[in-house]
Image (spheres, rainbow, N blue to C red):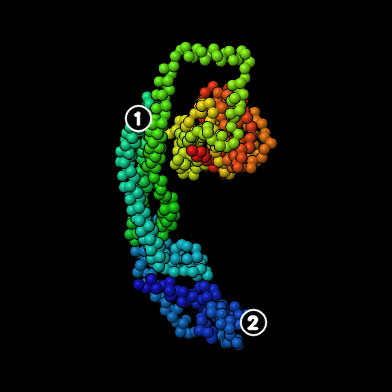
Amino acid sequence: MAELQIPIIINHLSCRICRNLLRNPATIPCGHNFCMDCIEGHWGAEQRDLSCPECEQRILYRPNVIRNTTLSQVLRHTERSWSRKRKPQESAESLRDQRTADTPGKGWYGLHNSTLNTYCFTDENDVYSLCVSDKHNGHINGLVKEKRRRKQEELRTMQTRLRERLQEQQKQQENMKKKFKQIEKEANKIMEDCETIIVRAIDHLQRHCMSMREMIETQAKTVEDQIDITLQNLETKMEEIKKMDAELDRLAESENSVLFLQKWSNMQSICEKDLLSFSEGSKDPLFSFKVTKRAIDQLGEKLGDFCDQQLPLIFQTCNNDQEESVEKRDAEDQQQKHQSSAGLYSGNMGKKDMEPKTREDFLQYACELSLDPATAHKDLIISDNDKEVKLSPRGCQIPSACFPERFNSRRQVLCREGLQAERCYYEVEVKGGKAEIALAYKGLDRKSSTEKSAFGANEKSWSLDLSNSYSVSHKSESILLKQSPSSKKIGVYLEFKEGSLSFFEVSDSMTFLYKLKANFTEPLYPGFWLDDKSCIRICDLK
């Protein structure tokens, strides 16, 4: 017990000027003690403004410094006591020093034959009590056990945080395992729904069933791989945390305080790093299946509506073709040939007189259009009614492999309907910045990053480009229009057999913009390109 009091006794019996044990101690009026030579030298012979070096109390007059006889006796008694206590321990301590001389952190050192029972908070290391006044002059010192107690509290706090994090990861692991079991069931259900919907369509849509199956299997495989990787990472991390927790237990039970402090600094930084590197997966792995399910449901509804509306017309057309006689066709052909040879243009004049002038006239040829999400670039999002397109949030993107018909490089989308009627008219509303309103053949390149896939830059598409001005493009040739944009609504009028495509600006009246002439050889699909700030909506004209 005497050894534990040595640092405290030394601190009390040390001169605050030279930091050594008091030699010829003297007491000044404020009650503090210093070596007589130290205090006399500190004040100087001619110095008048005097103060205590320890408490800085002002002294109004220079006192006669008198030797403190009692304190001198205490110092002599203390030194003798240390000498007597050291001698019986020298043999045991020398043997202990031989065992631990080459082993750092054991608490003994041959220089002082004493324990490392003092901790320097300034230098953050263990020191010998006899070195405090020499090498650690002016530093803040305390007992190693006190430092150990504080660090022990930090260790327990860290262990509590690690165990809480371990519980969170165990819960996450359980949730991941549950979702992993749901994937196969959900994938099978989606495939069954897909097959049920596709079977209701006409025969040539059967090939899309395989595409859907492969897409869902790819989604399932991708999600399974992601969850499998996440589970592996979680298991690895949990094992590391368990090992770290066990190591902290061993360190906490260590009786060697010096070894504890040496190891704890490194282990604390490792624990902090592991805690900071932890991140929970917030994205629902079943999200892609929900998107696919919604898309398939919409496809089923639209296929049903399409069949109900279009199949009776197809049957009627087929019946009419069967009833039409060969003679009637020949007569009409002969009549048409006769009119052409005779130079009669009455038919053309009649058609010209029937050209629409007002918006009400154009609305007679209004056609119903809907956007095809399967063709939309990954950066675009289509509204639930398939009438509006705009830039999509990054988190909603679906990989291109899920939709092989989509545009890969340009933010473009096509409509489902191919136009080849004698006359067709539709309107779109453009909000925001730049946009392109186009018509294209279905075979337009959708994978290339060159102009082959750009509207108006090839022989398979025609485009009206809208920005601060209008321009019309085809085969990479553009014509700048004089008309400046003044309305958000654009009307498109197609005469397929006639081979003409006209664009109008729609407001209270129809403002003609430009008319293209071409020999259309296959159905034209309306399409759109838009920049970051644009939004395009197909107007409902019926």
Q: Residue at x 55, y 14 (%)?
A: 335
Q: Is residue 497 left or right of residue 299?
A: right
Local crowd size for mark 2, using a 10 Å CA cut-off: few (<14), some (14–19), many (≥20)? few
Between residue 488 and residue 347, name the one nearer to us. Answer: 347
Would residue 99 be visible to someone looking at this image? Answer: no
Look at mark 1 in the image and give the residue it sits on: 200
Residue labelled with disc 2 = 47
Which sits in the foreground, 76 or 311? 311
* Mark pair 2, 1: CA separation: 111 Å
Position of residue 167 measured from the top left corner of the image (x, y, whole percent)? 33, 53
Where residue 233 appears, as percent x and y from the top left, is: 38, 44
Q: Quadrant of residue 102?
A: bottom left
Q: Is residue 206 left or right of residue 541?
A: left
- Residue 356: image quadrant is top right
The residue located at (59%, 78%) in the rendering is: 42
Q: Residue at x 48, y 14 (%)?
A: 328
The amino acid type, in three-letter code, at marker 2 is Gln
